[in-house]
Amino acid sequence: MAKYIFVTGGVISSLGKGIATASIAKILESCGFRVSLMKLDPYLNVDPGTMNPYQHGEVYVTYDGAETDLDLGHYERFTHARLGRINNVTTGQIYSSVLTKERKGEYLGKTIQVIPHITNEIKDRIKLVAKESRAEIILMEIGGTVGDIESLPFLEAARQFGLEEGRENVIYIHLTLVPYIKVAGEIKTKPTQHSVGTLREIGIQPDILLCRTEKPLADDVKAKISLFCNLQQNAVIEALDVSSIYEIPLIYKNQGLDKIILDHFRLKPKHTNLKDWQDKVVDKVVYPKHKTTIAVVGKYIELQDAYKSIYEALRHGGIANDCHVEIQKIDSENIELDGPEKSLAGVSGILVPGGFGYRGIEGKIKAIQYARENEIPFFGICLGMQCAAIEFARNAAGLKKANSTEFLKHATEPVISLLEEQRKVKLMGATMRLGEYPCQITKATKAYQAYRRTLICERHRHRYEFNNRYRTLFERKGMIFSGVYPKKNLVEMLEVKAHPWFVGVQFHPEFQSKPDKAHPLFREFIKASMR
């Protein structure tokens, strides 16, 4: 029988529920248990696929082509769980499913209500993950903050779950803020008391509190929280600010969080070992031997979460090379105004990530030209690869009017054009080329040096592609097409032959990178930048 952990958040948003959930899963996995994870999101969108990065941050893509919340990226990076579309649930999906059933007549004669129909649908989705994953422990992160109107159906479903499955099979973990008031020189527990009070009014008594704090919690503070929040003092877990998110599983384990959870579930650890995580990840992050500087040239730079997986994958590449990666976030619009030299002089590598729309594109193209002509290691991802093709066409292949039909619908030299199957698409949600596709790699290329395989699978999220009409010309001018989708002969990877390391990929390799297993391309990109 599966065991269930619900993770909620209180006081304020952005406390790090996703990383906390992933870290708990990591320590339970280190005890020998199979885990799976879910994000229960209260917004009405069916998925985040059509949401602006400024609204939502990064859209994470699963192997089966679901556009999901970025927290699924944390879950997959920290654990061995393979997550798909069933692991991300939104209010929009729940209501859509219930209303579809109502139209089909599955509730004939009944009034459709939040309780029981919406809450039953939520519980059914949780049980589906338990069935499909065959995991021994399922962790559900409920988005938003306790007290939000939008999250009430999810919290009510979680409450019911404890009654139906038995409290010995369900744990409620609440992440809360214990602020330090600098002018008073005091740590305040009242926000946590109010947050837990609100949760208890809903009918949920938390079993464990994770207390986000910038100052260590003294025993008397923990005792006060324990008394007023009605739980054991050892279940008040200190979640101190750290320099690296990859330290968090060790911090939780050192406070016995895994033992508290397993004792509640009446489970015994099969083994318990985070030594590899300490040696191969945390120590490499905290005590690196080398250093390199990577410029990420994007259009959503001011928002930390817009390129979350990119930043983490760069750090993973650093871990693999025992190297600290200093990331310089460069707004491509600034390069349009001031030129590339001002922003990029002195960097050891340049990465241009994905995105949509024309804003900032010419700045990305100038940054790529700067990398190519000055032999600076370059990595282009999705739109970054397409911009690399446009730059090469204009400045190396003599096609001065080269462009993408995304930016100029009737371009005279459309080196990037709309995928054939996209031409008749009307609905914008979940209609891109999404999920895993195979890629055939050519030997004697940078791609093959990285992967050491001729067939790989990578995740996609795009509508446009390289126009095969220009392949022969590009090859004559020194471009190598090192990876193709064999079924339709689509360009997946390109390289500039006369360059130390210049690689563009149509897919998103950052979605398959882990701290203890860096993606091969990020590993080799960082290695090239160190030279």
Image: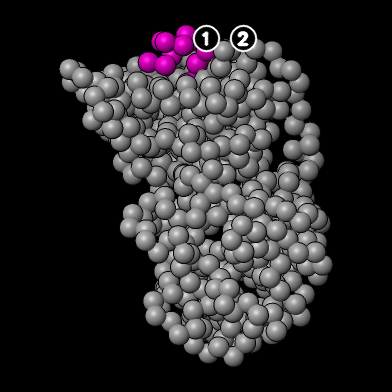
Q: Residue at x 65, y 18 (%)?
A: 259
Instruction: Identify the mark at residue 80; answer none if there is no mark.
Output: none
Q: Quadrant of residue 289?
A: bottom right
Three-letter code for the amino acid on which mark 1 is drawn: Glu
Q: Quadrant of residue 99?
A: top left
Residue stretch rendered in magenta on the structure:
160-178
- The Cα–Cα distance between marks 2 and 1, rounded to whole angstroms, is 8 Å
Q: Is 380 on the left-hand or right-hand side of 377?
A: left
Is residue 352 visible in this depiction of the protein? no
Q: Which quarter of the rendered picture does the N terminus lie within?
A: top right
Q: How far from the left and from the top, in percent, is residue 96?
A: 30, 35
Q: As rendered, which of 88 and 210 lies closer to the eye?
A: 88
Q: Which residue is mark 1?
A: 168
Q: As rendered, which of 107 and 23 lies closer to the eye?
A: 107
Is 500 contained in the magenta span? no
Q: Is residue 450 above or below residue 405?
A: above
Q: How far from the left and from the top, in percent, is residue 413?
A: 49, 83
Q: Residue at x 59, y 61 (%)?
A: 488
Verify CB contact (< 8 Å) between mark 2 and mark 1: yes
Q: Which quarter of the rendered picture does the C terminus lie within?
A: bottom right
Look at the image and name its color scheme.
Answer: one colour
Q: How far from the left and from the top, in percent, is residue 160?
A: 37, 15
Question: If you read the primary sequence from the N terminus, does the residue marked by circle 2 or circle 1 appear first?
Answer: 1
> Counting other residues with Cα less than 10 Å from the Cα at mark 1, is it few (<14), some (14-19), or many (20 or more)?
some
> Counting other residues with Cα less than 10 Å from the Cα at mark 2, is it few (<14), some (14-19), or many (20 or more)?
few
Three-letter code for the amino acid on which mark 2 is drawn: Arg
Is 174 contained in the magenta span? yes
Q: Is residue 480 above or below residue 252?
A: below
Q: Is residue 241 above or below residue 493?
A: above
Q: Secondary structure at mark 1?
A: helix
Q: Which residue is mark 2?
A: 266
Q: Is 505 on the left-hand or right-hand side of 236?
A: right
